[in-house]
Amino acid sequence: APQYLERTRRYDFDMTTMNLPQSLNPGNEQAQFWGSAAAVQNGNYNYAGIRNPVIDEVISKLVTAKDREQQITYTHVLDRLLRAGYYQIPTYGKGDYWYAYWNMYQQPKVKPVLSAGIEYWWSNANQAKKVAQYLHQQ
């Protein structure tokens, strides 16, 4: 693990898996993820080494957007530029969460934004007994 961490900090790899969490209100962190300045500084999050003045300009406009509508527009433009550059393979673009589980859990009707809310599930005692009986029959 230490070697992996050190090599990613120095951008000394061919390919890696990273999670760059995004918020519903994108801002300055976009420069660390995609900005040219971050690409030449060890330890930043621009793992792809992107150095593109157009992306830098869009990030600047995104950060200084006057209202939510502008922010959304610049976020969409940034998204299209990043997709066009083929810098990454997105793995979290699916709007659903798939889980395999025994039918003994219940879920709240209202779930957190951008989360499956699995940490809020609870066990139904009657259903848990049925599952236990089924498993003991196998």
Image (spheres, rainbow, N blue to C red):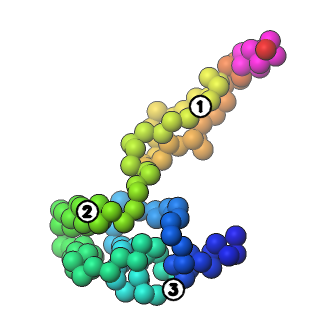
Mark carried by residue 6: none
Residue drawn at x 38%, y 49% as measured from the top left: 93
Which residue type does callout 3 highlight? Asn
Q: Report which residue position mark 3 lands on.
A: 42
Q: What crowding class fits label 2: few (fewer than 14 Cα within 10 Å), some (14-19), or many (20 or more)?
A: few
Please tell me whether mark 1 sits on a helix, a strand or a loop.
loop
Question: Magenta segment range?
Answer: 129-137
Q: How many marks?
A: 3
In the rendered image, the residue lying farthest to the top is 137
**Image quadrant for the N terminus?**
bottom right
Residue at the image position 46 percent from the left and 64 percent from the top: 20
* Lower sequence index among marks 1 and 2: 2
Is 25 positioned to the left or the right of 43 in the image?
Answer: left
Is residue 136 covered in magenta? yes
User: In this image, 48 relative to 54: left or right?
Assistant: right
> Is residue 23 shown to the viewer in this render?
no
Disc 3, SS: loop
Residue that numbered label 1 is attached to: 100
Find the distance from the CA under tag 1 to the CA under tag 3. 40 Å
Residue 133, how many percent across, how many down?
78, 14
Q: Earlier in the sequence, mark 3 or mark 2?
A: 3
Residue 48 forms part of the magenta stretch: no
Q: Secondary structure at mark 2?
A: helix
Q: Amino acid at mark 1?
A: Ala
